[in-house]
Amino acid sequence: MLAEKFDIREMLFFADFSNPGMRAEIPRIREVTNLIIETQNTSPRYKKDFTDFIMLDNIYQKAFSSPEVDTFIIFTGDGHFSSVVRFLTQSCRKKVYVYAVKDGLSGMLKSVCTKAYETPSEQDIDVTYYSMIAKKLKEADTTGKRFPDPSFSAVVAAVSDHYGIDRETVKEKANKMAHAGYLTVTANKLSHNKRVSTVALNEKKLAADGIKLIEDQAYFFIPNRSAEKQSN
């Protein structure tokens, strides 16, 4: 946690909150800070996103108005921030830590900051959940137990209980996994004319997309190079 490493004096969020998806995040952001900067471009003629410009302006102003601040932490991988980071580190003698999504960090930005950290991409996070679900299903196969629930509630409950993860999050990832074709649902007729569905891994699809099963039965994403060449 950053709060354990730094004496955080101020935390600001910059975004165009006119986007419904972003606006839905405001209540969660307010749990951390009320310093939310709306960057929406209201001009009817120009549609350019002003978020970067507003962030840069705020950083320069903070550097001049608060000389006692010795560390800046910036969440971006955009190379447009290289100049301001170089100004902070070389001219102002500040420490600048950059956090960026994996594979989204500019090499120039990385070279001028004090230290850069890459956080997991959304795909990495999804595959981690897929791994948990896959492992539970593999365990069910080896023990002879099944998860006869078309809504995946039994799978969700097992994963949630074992890993201590919120059930709604696991359910969301399980549904996403099924939508991607990594899970197959088969209808089976049971007694009393009731029909239920069993959930099974589609290991052919997993392998085709480069998500491989290793010895400890965990799934990790490995880019399918041959597929990439075919698509180019």
Image: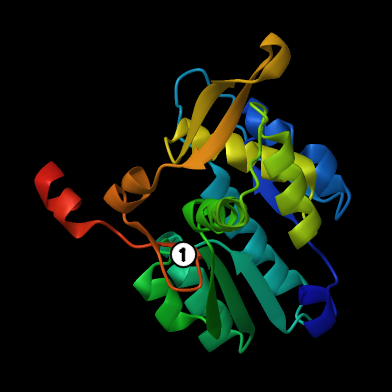
Quadrant containing the N terminus is bottom right
Pointer 1: what residue? Answer: 102
Residue at the spot x=55%, y=75% of the render?
117
Closer-to-camera residue (93/185): 185
Quadrant containing the C terminus is top left
Residue at the spot x=44%, y=41% of the render?
182
Residue at the spot x=64%, y=85% of the render?
94
Give how far across and how far down residue 142 sits, in percent. 56, 57
As helix, strand or loop, the secondary structure at mark 1 comes to loop
| Above or below: residue 103 compared with residue 55 | below
| Above or below: residue 53 compared with residue 21 | below
Give how far across and how far down residue 96 sits, in percent. 60, 79
Q: Is residue 115 left or right of residue 12?
A: left
Judging from the image, the colouring scheme is rainbow
Residue at the spot x=69%, y=14% of the render?
194
Give how far across and how far down residue 114 sits, in percent. 55, 86
Q: Residues within 10 Å of mark 1 (few under 14, many from 20)?
A: some
Whether residue 149 is visible:
yes
User: Please, what is the three-letter code of the amino acid marked with disc 1?
Assistant: Lys
